[in-house]
Amino acid sequence: MGKVSRFWRRAVQTARLMVGLPDYETYLAHRLAHHPSEPVMSYAEFFRERQQARYSTGGKPTGCC
Protein backbone atom coordinates (compact mmCIF):
# COMPACT_ATOMS: atom_id res chain seq x y z
CA MET A 1 0.00 0.00 0.00
CA GLY A 2 2.85 2.42 0.75
CA LYS A 3 4.34 2.12 -2.73
CA VAL A 4 0.99 2.79 -4.40
CA SER A 5 0.35 5.82 -2.19
CA ARG A 6 3.82 7.21 -2.86
CA PHE A 7 3.42 6.61 -6.60
CA TRP A 8 0.03 8.35 -6.60
CA ARG A 9 1.41 11.43 -4.78
CA ARG A 10 4.30 11.66 -7.27
CA ALA A 11 1.92 11.24 -10.23
CA VAL A 12 -0.33 14.04 -8.95
CA GLN A 13 2.67 16.29 -8.30
CA THR A 14 3.99 15.62 -11.82
CA ALA A 15 0.60 16.35 -13.39
CA ARG A 16 0.34 19.65 -11.51
CA LEU A 17 3.82 20.69 -12.59
CA MET A 18 3.00 19.80 -16.19
CA VAL A 19 0.12 22.26 -16.21
CA GLY A 20 2.05 24.92 -14.31
CA LEU A 21 0.75 24.45 -10.78
CA PRO A 22 3.51 23.97 -8.23
CA ASP A 23 2.78 21.61 -5.37
CA TYR A 24 1.49 23.26 -2.17
CA GLU A 25 3.28 20.75 0.07
CA THR A 26 6.59 21.55 -1.65
CA TYR A 27 5.88 25.26 -1.13
CA LEU A 28 5.24 24.68 2.59
CA ALA A 29 8.44 22.68 3.00
CA HIS A 30 10.44 25.42 1.24
CA ARG A 31 8.91 28.21 3.31
CA LEU A 32 9.53 26.41 6.59
CA ALA A 33 13.12 25.54 5.62
CA HIS A 34 14.19 28.87 4.11
CA HIS A 35 11.79 31.53 5.45
CA PRO A 36 10.57 30.25 8.85
CA SER A 37 9.79 33.67 10.33
CA GLU A 38 7.64 34.82 7.41
CA PRO A 39 3.91 34.08 7.04
CA VAL A 40 2.75 31.16 4.89
CA MET A 41 -0.08 31.48 2.35
CA SER A 42 -3.16 29.33 2.70
CA TYR A 43 -3.84 26.85 -0.11
CA ALA A 44 -6.40 29.23 -1.65
CA GLU A 45 -3.95 32.15 -1.54
CA PHE A 46 -1.19 29.96 -2.97
CA PHE A 47 -3.42 28.76 -5.81
CA ARG A 48 -4.52 32.32 -6.72
CA GLU A 49 -0.95 33.64 -6.55
CA ARG A 50 0.38 30.85 -8.77
CA GLN A 51 -2.43 31.34 -11.31
CA GLN A 52 -1.82 35.08 -11.39
CA ALA A 53 1.95 34.62 -11.75
CA ARG A 54 1.52 32.09 -14.53
CA TYR A 55 -0.74 34.28 -16.64
CA SER A 56 0.65 37.74 -15.87
CA THR A 57 4.36 37.04 -16.43
CA GLY A 58 4.15 34.71 -19.38
CA GLY A 59 5.21 31.76 -17.24
CA LYS A 60 8.60 33.22 -16.31
CA PRO A 61 9.71 32.43 -12.73
CA THR A 62 9.52 35.41 -10.37
CA GLY A 63 10.07 33.85 -6.93
CA CYS A 64 13.01 34.09 -4.57
CA CYS A 65 14.58 30.74 -5.36
Image (cartoon, rainbow, N blue to C red):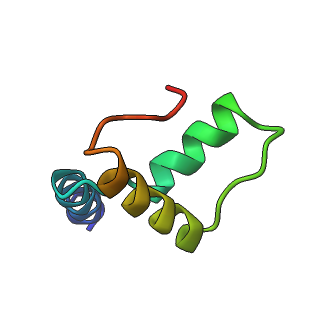
46 left or right, relative to 9: right
| Residue shown at the point (42%, 60%) measured from the top left | 52
| Residue shown at the point (22%, 64%) measured from the top left | 8
| Percent of width and height locating residue 29 | 57, 43
Depth order, front residue of 12/55: 55
Depth order, front residue of 14/22: 22
36 left or right, relative to 2: right
51 left or right, relative to 34: left
Quarter occupied by the N terminus: bottom left
Instruction: State whether residue 30 is above or below residue 7.
Output: above
Depth order, front residue of 21/61: 61
Count the numbered circles shown: 0
Instruction: State whether residue 20 is above or below residue 63.
Output: below
| Residue shown at the point (72%, 34%) measured from the top left | 35
Question: Picture quarter containing residue 60?
Answer: top left
| Percent of width and height locating residue 63 | 49, 34
Residue 4 appears in the picture as rendered: yes
56 left or right, relative to 44: left
| Percent of width and height locating residue 2 | 30, 61
Residue 22 appears in the picture as rendered: no
| Percent of width and height locating residue 26 | 46, 47
Question: Picture quarter containing residue 3?
Answer: bottom left
Q: Residue furthest right?
A: 37
